[in-house]
Image: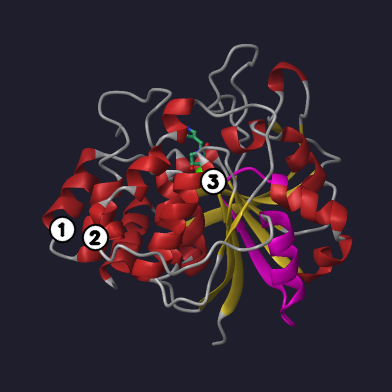
């Protein structure tokens, strides 16, 4: 089977960076571009970490584009710091040099080029807010028909989202909340959207048994890298708090390599862009259809991601 062209835009969290690492191990995936948006990260360490991950675990041939997009609702600083910790890991700094270059163009223009330069349609994987995609569509509406689909970690149709901020009612998921208008813009298009929403990501919290499993296998470099990265973020122990870590983006990425891990249903939906529910995705009869990933085989997912890491 021919390799699937994938363009990856992420926002530098631990699970975004692990997603990049795992994408580089997948069969049937050809990464055509990587870009980083400073949403749930600071840009500099997230771009460094991405370049070093490609150097250490990829086959070269890529550059990493920096986004100059800005959101409406900033992420908490503590979370944005995570990229500094990944970037500092000894395994990413052993060689003492960085070969993967920074792209000349900003992320949204870099993505337009990557899409136009392929004869086949490109699948977009977004694990942060949709700002760069919204801007790209405004500048270059022609790319819409060259997009196979958008696979996005974002949204929820549950009562409870994961935003706990003043002036908000808690119904939004963060990647929508950071830039609700960008999601609204993408909702206006005819692009097929696979939404890996909190319904499914809530089923894959970071737990101690998973950490122990990676620790036992740490003689494998790839599995050790998982363990080191997930040592930086808080697991679910007694109950879920605002900072509890889930494998949001990694589940999203895993659906590319292994579709049968998840169950999907189509929901017509609208994005609320203003007021106390801004960033909320709601089911509406006249809304646009999205394929919502609402269920996951949790054990098969952890087996699959660990198996990918072992390939290093
Ligand atoms: O809402 C989930 C998104 C995912 O793309 N991000 C983290 C993932 O990369 C924001 C987020 C929500 N809760 C968080 C987040 C937390 N407790 N720590 C860090 N980031
Ligand atoms: Ca993310």
The answer to whether residue 181 is visible is yes
Q: In which quarter of the image is the N terminus?
A: bottom right
Per the image, label 1 sits on a secondary structure element best described as loop
N-term-proximal mark, 3 vs 2: 3
Q: Where is mark 1, residue-wise? A: 218
Per the image, label 2 sits on a secondary structure element best described as helix
**Residue 168 occupies which quadrant of the picture?**
top right
Contact between marks 3 and 2 (CB within 8 A): the answer is: no
Is the residue marked 3 within 8 Å of ligand 2, measured from its CB? yes
Q: In which quarter of the image is the C terminus?
A: bottom left
| x and y, in percent, of residue 213 in the image | 18, 52
N-term-proximal mark, 1 vs 2: 1
In the rendered structure, find residue 223 and report the number of the disc placed on it: 2
| x and y, in percent, of residue 232 in the image | 29, 39
Q: Please, is residue 304 above or below residue 26 in the view?
A: above
Q: What stretch is highlighted in magenta?
A: 107-131
């Amino acid at each position: 089977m021919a390799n699937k062209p994938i363009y990856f835009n992420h926002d530098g969290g631990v699970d975004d960076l692990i997603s990049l690492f795992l994408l580089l191990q997948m069969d049937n995936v050809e990464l055509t571009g990587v870009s980083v948006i400073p949403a749930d990260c600071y840009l500099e360490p997230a771009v460094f970490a991405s370049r070093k991950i490609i150097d250490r675990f990829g086959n070269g041939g890529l550059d990493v584009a920096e986004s100059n997009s800005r959101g409406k609702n900033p992420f908490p600083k503590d979370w944005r710091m995570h990229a500094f910790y990944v970037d500092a890991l000894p395994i990413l700094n052993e060689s003492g040099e960085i070969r993967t270059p920074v792209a000349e163009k900003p992320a949204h223009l870099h993505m337009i080029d990557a899409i136009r330069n392929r004869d086949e349609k490109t699948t977009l994987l977004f694990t942060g807010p949709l700002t760069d995609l919204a801007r790209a569509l405004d500048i270059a509406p022609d790319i819409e028909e060259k997009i196979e689909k958008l696979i996005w970690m974002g949204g929820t149709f549950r009562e409870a989202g994961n935003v706990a901020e003043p002036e908000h009612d808690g119904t939004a998921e963060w990647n929508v909340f950071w830039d609700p208008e960008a999601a609204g813009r993408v909702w206006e298009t005819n692009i097929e959207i696979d939404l890996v929403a909190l319904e499914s990501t809530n089923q894959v919290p970071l737990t101690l048994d998973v950490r122990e499993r990676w620790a036992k296998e740490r003689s494998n470099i790839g599995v050790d890298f998982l363990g080191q990265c997930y040592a930086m973020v808080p697991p679910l122990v007694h109950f879920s708090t605002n900072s509890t870590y889930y494998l949001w983006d990694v589940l999203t990425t895993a659906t590319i390599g292994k579709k049968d891990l998840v169950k999907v249903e189509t929901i017509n939906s609208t994005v609320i862009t203003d007021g106390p529910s801004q960033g909320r995705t709601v089911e509406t009869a006249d809304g646009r259809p999205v394929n919502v990933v609402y269920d996951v085989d949790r054990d098969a997912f952890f087996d699959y991601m660990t198996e990918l890491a072992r390939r290093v």
